[in-house]
């Protein structure tokens, strides 16, 4: 799954690809974190090498409505939790692909 960020838009693409989670942008790292935070999809953390996305908000935006998607998404989040890529306040860490 990829979250795309441009100056005036945040979107989710490839919602069925649940083996990776990345934020893709051409904005600089600080600007993309600001944009995601203002949009309500993320929370700011000291670490700007990753984006910390709200688990439930991401699910709401990404859900294609297909059978079994939510169970697969929840499994992705459980895997991320097992790797230490989630927070106690329901955030998941995403790769930040930015200049």
Image: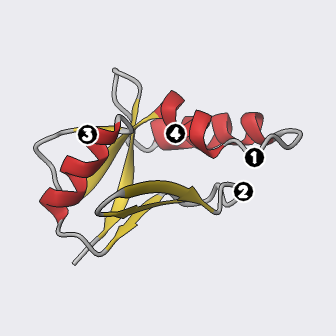
Name which of mark 2 and mark 3 comes first in the sequence: 2
Residue that mark 1 sits on: 64
Q: Give residue 58's mark.
A: 4
Q: Secondary structure at mark 3?
A: helix
Q: Nearer the viewer, residue 54 or 34?
A: 34
Q: Is residue 80 left or right of residue 51?
A: right
Q: Residues within 10 Å of mark 3 (few under 14, many from 20)?
A: few
Residue drawn at 17 percent across, 40 percent down: 45
Distance CA(mark 4)–CA(mark 2): 13 Å
Q: Position of residue 97 (x, y in %)?
A: 33, 71
Residue drawn at 25 percent across, 50 percent down: 35
Residue drawn at 65 percent across, 34 percent down: 74
Q: Is residue 76 left or right of residue 95?
A: right
Q: Position of residue 93 (x, y in %)?
A: 36, 46
Name which of mark 4 and mark 3 comes first in the sequence: 3
Q: Position of residue 69 (x, y in %)?
A: 78, 42
Q: Nearer the viewer, residue 27 or 98?
A: 27
Q: Is residue 55 left or right of residue 49?
A: right
Q: Are marks 4 and 3 in contact (CB under 8 Å)?
A: no
Q: Give residue 89's mark.
A: none
Distance CA(mark 4)–CA(mark 3): 14 Å
> Can you say which quadrant of the picture contains the N terminus?
bottom right
Farthest residue, direction top: 89
- Foreground: disc 4 or disc 3: 3
């Amino acid at each position: 799954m990829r979250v795309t960020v441009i100056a005036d838009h945040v979107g989710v693409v490839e919602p069925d690809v649940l083996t990776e989670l990345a934020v893709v942008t051409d904005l600089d790292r600080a600007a993309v974190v600001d944009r995601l935070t203002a949009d309500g999809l993320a929370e700011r953390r000291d670490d700007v090498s990753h984006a910390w996305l709200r688990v439930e908000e991401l699910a709401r935006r990404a859900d294609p409505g297909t059978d079994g998607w939510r169970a697969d998404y929840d499994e992705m989040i459980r895997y991320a939790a097992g790797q230490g890529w989630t927070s106690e306040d329901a955030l998941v860490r995403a790769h930040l692909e930015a200049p």
